[in-house]
Amino acid sequence: MKTITTTEALEEFCTRAASYPYVTVDTEFLRERTYYSKLCLVQLAVPGEDDDEDAVLVDPLVEGLSLEPMYELFRNEDVVKVFHAARQDLEIFFVEADVFPTPLFDTQVAAMVCGFGDQVGYETLVRKIAKAQLDKSSRFTDWSRRPLTPAQKNYAIGDVTHLRVIYEWLSAELEKSGRAKWVKEELRVLTDPATYTIEPGEAWKRLKTRTNSGRFLAVARELARFREGYAQARNIPRNRVMKDDALLELASTKPRNMQELGRSRLLLREARKGEIAEGILAAVATGVDMPSDQMPKPQNGGKEKLQVNPALADLLRVLLKARCEQEKVAQKLIASAADLDALAAGKRDVAALKGWRAEVFGEDAVRLCDGKLALAAKGQHVKVIEV
């Protein structure tokens, strides 16, 4: 198979790809040792059966190779860019080049709309749609090492050659069902820069805390802000600065000097001195001295105050299951458990009541809550009855 190692060869392939209605795309990357993913390989394929010409590997680790021809193809509105589970791939391209492939098609999202279940895997679609088997032996190899083995190359190229068959099948199904707009609506979040931008000041919201203490949360927020900014600036994993359990321990003990910091049971050795230690102490001091009106509010505070009608929540779950079975669409794509609880508590500002979800489930969910619909069992199925 062809491996592209020069800008000229990449430009030649991308110019050719621009004459096709779609191109399939995948990446291989590493993230264990960096904050941002390290791009190690790009796979591209155009429609056709000659995989020696129609599918290529692009080696971004080769010195002097520019990916700009590929990014130019990504900007071409006449060519659909097809991915499976695109989020991590798109994050790489956004961070590397501030570009999103448009128009975009994600076969995982499309498969959920077409009734393949929640977050269906690529291997499942290859087996069910392309009627082929994947060699998974190279899935967890080190993609940054060179040279790549034949097994690695075969595995990588399979991620875009089978994708052509899957895309064409799913695309045809969506056209027949009239649900192409559903997928398009779902993909908007994937091309929103906010999806991939983590502000250090918001990083504390990822923490799992068991206390509602404003002072504890203030210190935790400042520690998370420091950790995120430090990790981003140096492109290292946040856990290399300090792990979550160490951060929460420090938010509890609130060390004010190096001696107190040294008593931490969970802090990494590298974090007990130098820039990290100084940053930790500064963050703790900021949190400890923070005025009460500037302290963060507990993340779960709103949920705890919901007056959920448990019986109604159970009925909504039954309705959701019935509607999704009827429409052959994944439940997770329509509404989460939190959405159902919010509806059962009288809330109406939930995603399940917007866009195409409202047509499939949301409108009936509100009518059920208002006593205008009833549910009845009929054999193995649930029947919706007008009241």
Image (spheres, rainbow, N blue to C red):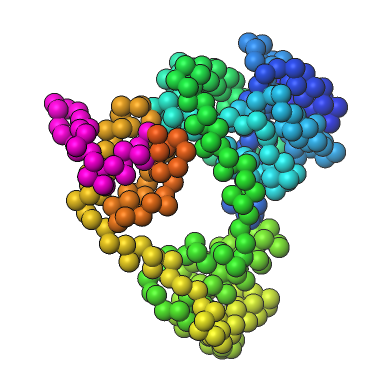
- Tag count in the figure? 0
The front one of 213 and 385 is 385
Q: Quadrant of residue 347?
A: bottom left
Residue 217 vertical position relative to residue 344 in the rendered view, above or below: below
The image position of residue 143, as x and y in percent, is 64, 39
Residue 364 visible somewhere in the drawing: yes
Does residue 269 belong to the magenta stretch? no
The image position of residue 281, as x and y in percent, is 60, 82
Viewport quadrant of the C terminus: top left
- The residue at the point 86 percent across, 27 percent down is 8
Residue most toward the top?
A: 49
Could you tell whether 25 is left or right of 139 in the image? right
Residue 348 vertical position relative to residue 153 in the rendered view, above or below: below
Could you tell whether 79 is left or right of 337 in the image? right
The front one of 97 and 371 is 371
Image: magenta residue range: 360-387
Could you tell whether 41 is left or right of 372 in the image? right
Residue 23 vertical position relative to residue 250 in the rendered view, above or below: above
The front one of 24 and 340 is 340
Viewport quadrant of the N terminus: top right
- The residue at the point 40 percent across, 38 percent down is 358
- The residue at the point 60 percent across, 68 percent down is 201
The image position of residue 79, as x and y in percent, is 69, 24
Q: Quadrant of residue 93?
A: top right
